[in-house]
Amino acid sequence: MKEVIFYLLIIGAGTGGELCVSRAMKVVGEVKDFRPAALLGVASRALRVPWMWLGLSLMGTAFFALLAVLSIENVSLVVPVTALSYAGGALGGRFFLGEQVTRRRWTGVLLVCVGVALVIMGRR
Amino acid sequence: MKSSGGLHFKTYLLILLMVIFGPLGNVLLGKGMKRIGAASLGTPAEVFNLLSRVLTSGTIWLGIGSLITFFAAYMLVLSWADYSYVQPASSVAYGMVALLAHFMLREVVTPLRWLGVLVICLGVLVVGHTPPRTTEPSQIMEPRS
C-alpha cells in the first residue's frame, strides 16, 4: 500500500512537474548559445517564470517519493513502472501545452505502455 | 528558424546525454537507498533520521549529480522540442536502467521483463519518426514582467 502511494506521487507529481517545467522553458524560448555565461542567463530567466518554481516543487516531491520506493523495491522494477506517466505526458502535452500529438506518436506511446505492463508482469 | 537537420542533431545529442545520465543516476540512487534500508516514515524522528542518512551517502550524491546533468540536458532540449516528443524519446533510458541494474547491481531481470523493455524500445523507435516540434514558441509565450 505504501508503495502504491509512492508510485502515485512519482507519476502524478513527476508528470505535473515536467509539464510545468516544459511550459516554463517554452516561455524562455529556444536555447541557441551553449556558452556557460549564456546558459547561466537562461537559468536566471527560467527561474523568473512561476511555472518553473511550481514544476521544481512537484519534481522535488516526486524525487523524494522515488528515493523512498527505491529503498523497498529493485531499480529494474521501479523505473519502468514510473513510465506509466507516458499516457499522462502525452495527454498533458496535447491539452496543457497545445502540442499536436500525431496518431503515429500515440501508437509509440501505447507500445511503451504495453512494454511497461510486461515489465510489471515480469516481476518474480 | 533553424534548419531541420541542425535541430535534429542538437535534439539527438541532448537526448543521448539524457539516456546516459538519467539511468546512471537512478541506478546509483537505487544502490544508495538499498544500503540505507527500507524507508520508515512513521514519526518525525524517523523521517529526520532517514533524511540525514540519505544526505550523507556518497552514492546518493553521485546519483544526484548524474540526475542534475540529465535534468540540464532535458531542460535545454525542452526549450525547442515538444514535451510529448522528448519524454517518449528518452524512454530508451528504460533499457539502459535494466542493463545497468543487471550488470551493476546484479538484479535478476526475468525474460518477460526484458521483453517489456524491448517493447518500450520499439515504441521509442515509432515515436522517434515524428517531428520534434509542432508548436511555435510564440504560441504559448507569456508576457515577461
Image (cartoon, coloured by chain):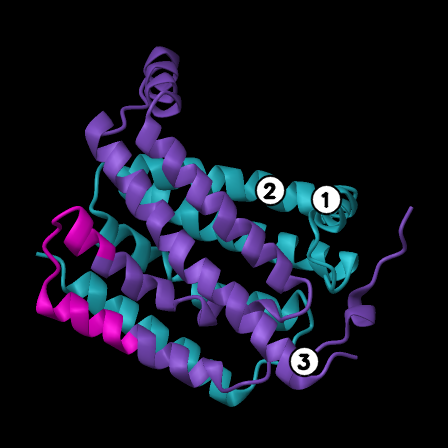
Chain colours: A cyan, B purple
Residue A68, image x and y in percent?
A: 32, 35
Label 3's element?
A: loop
Q: Is residue B53 above or below residue B82?
A: above
Is A22 within the magenta? Answer: no
Does residue A84 lie above or below B51 as drawn? below
Q: Identify the residue position indicated by label 3 in the image.
A: B134
Picture disc at residue A40: 1
Between B75 and A124, the one nearer to me in the picture: B75
Whether discs 1 and 3 lie on one chain: the answer is no
**SS at badge 1:** helix
Q: Which residues are magenta?
A: B100-119
Q: Tell me the subunit letter for badge 1.
A: A
Mark pair 2, 1: CA separation: 17 Å
What residue is disc 2 on? A56
Q: Residues within 10 Å of mark 1 (few under 14, many from 20)?
A: few
Question: In the image, what residue occupies the spot 32% across and 15% down?
Answer: B46
- Rounded to the nearest angstrom, the CA distance separating label 1 from label 3 is 27 Å
Residue flagged by tag 2: what amino acid is it? Leu
Chain that bears disc 2: A
Queried whether the magenta region covers residue B109, the answer comes back as: yes
Q: Residue visible at 21% across and 65% down? A: A119
Q: Amino acid at mark 3?
A: Thr
Q: Residues within 10 Å of mark 2 (few under 14, many from 20)?
A: some
First in sequence, mark 2 or 1: give its number. Answer: 1
Locate residue A123 relative to residue B83 in the image: left or right.
Answer: left
Give the prevailing secondary structure in the magenta stretch: helix
The correct choice, above or below, for A58 with respect to A113 in the image is above
- Please tell me in which quadrant of the rendered image residue A122 appears: bottom left
Whether callout 2 and callout 1 share a subunit is answered: yes
Residue B90, x across and y down, in percent: 44, 66
Tag 3: Cα neighbours inside 10 Å, few (<14), some, or many (≥20)?
Answer: some
